[in-house]
Image: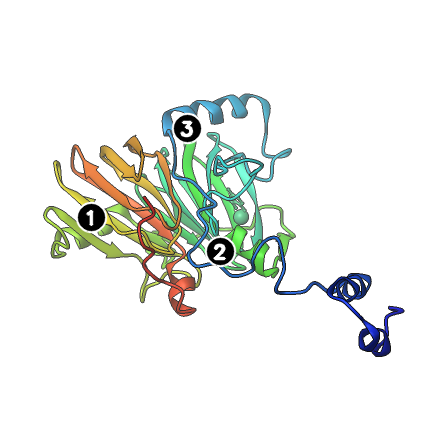
Amino acid sequence: MSAVTAEDYDKAASMEELYALLAKQGIENGWNKPEPSLWPLPNRDFVPAHWSYREAKAALNAAGRFVNTELAERRNLILANPIPGNKYPTVKTLICAYQMVKAGETARSHRHSANALRLVLDTGENAFTIVDGKKVPMVSGDVLLTPNWSWHAHSNESTQHAYWMDFLDVPTVHLLGPMFFEHHPEGIEKADEIASDSPMRFPFEETKARLAAEKEFAAGCRIIELGNPPPAMKTISLKVIRVDAGASFELEPSTLSTIYSPMYGAGKVTMEDKTFTWSRGDSIAGPSSYPQRWEAEEESYLLQVSDEPLLSRLDWLRPVPPRS
Ligand code: GTQ
Ligand code: FE2
């Protein structure tokens, strides 16, 4: 392979000669690199960002005029974090997208190693995600899981378009490499049974009742974790925070990457020097190392999607000191 031998190194008479030999072998010295490999605090390579459902819905409606589900495996709009050159992740480990399936339309069955979940925004009656052969109803405010390798299709048997948000751990799969994807041999998997009580479904009514029975963690603020036992999925934590009208809470900067969607309500969030005004169905990226201060103008339910299970399992869930 390399023409460099031990004797060449023995004969090296200067640092320059040593560097030249190393370079010939494609070996980098670890002490004199332009960029260090280790640094004192996490890089802040993603930025806080906000997308409004109102615009996303209009964009999906436009896509509905031009793109059918034959052409598009999924009619989805990916919320890429607005940092230079980024075309994909919403925060470092997670992706968030808006998706629409038109009245009467289906999106075919597939499965993948990436874990996914949906927050249902607007549907008529009889919109379903078919998960492993069962029709799981999609009702506004519901959270539906399609974990690693479960078959899933979307079937909108209502007379209204169905809109929801998808959250997936695909950027984590990209990093670690275990990507697998298959189409279902039947196109859309046959399903007769409606499974309203599927363990893959967290109906909003139950979420609301659980929160009402919960103690406050801050004045007017309550939190629960979805999943039995939590977390619902190996890589993703799902929490719902109820913030009463006029109440607020703060999260110190940490290594967690978070994405939020208000299931109901309206308010503001400040992440360091950025403040966003949000309402139902919006999407907010809360990258690691940024503080968050959430304020509700009316009673609000926030879905928080994060990479907590991954970070805590690896002992990498840590506070990060404020930067500014
Ligand atoms: O609905 O199965 O936004 O597989 C991205 C990938 C949705 C889905 C997305 C997916 C899906
Ligand atoms: Fe999928």
Q: Secondary structure at mark 3?
A: loop
Judged from this view, the residue extending furthest toward the front is: 13
**Residue 243 placed where, x, y %?**
17, 43
In this image, 120 relative to 78: left or right?
left
Instruction: Give the distance between the C-alpha atoms of the residues marked 3 and 2, in whole angstroms.
Output: 29 Å
- State which tag comes first along the sequence, 3 or 2: 2
Q: Against 18, is 286 above or below?
A: above
Decide if residue 192 is in sight here.
no
* Residue assigned mark 2: 115
Which one is closest to the eye, mark 1 or mark 3?
A: 1
**Residue 285 placed where, x, y %?**
39, 41
Amino acid tagged 2: Asn
- State which tag comes first along the sequence, 2 or 1: 2
**Residue 292 placed where, x, y %?**
28, 44
Decide if residue 15 is in sight here.
yes
Instruction: Give the distance between the C-alpha atoms of the residues marked 1 and 3, in whole angstroms.
Output: 27 Å
Crowd class of label 3 (few under 14; some 14 to 19; many from 20; radius 10 Å): some
Whether pointer 2 and pointer 1 mark residues with C-beta atoms closer than 8 Å, the reply is no
Query: Residue sitting at 61 percent across and 35 percent down?
Result: 72
Crowd class of label 2 (few under 14; some 14 to 19; many from 20; radius 10 Å): many
Query: Residue sitting at 42 percent across and 40 percent down?
Result: 47
Amino acid tagged 3: Thr
Instruction: Give the distance between the C-alpha atoms of the residues marked 2 and 1, in whole angstroms.
Output: 25 Å
**Residue 23 placed where, x, y %?**
78, 61
Amino acid tagged 1: Lys
Label drawn at residue 270: none
User: Viewer-proximal residue, 204 or 128?
Assistant: 204
* Residue assigned mark 3: 159
* Residue assigned mark 1: 208
Q: Secondary structure at mark 2?
A: loop
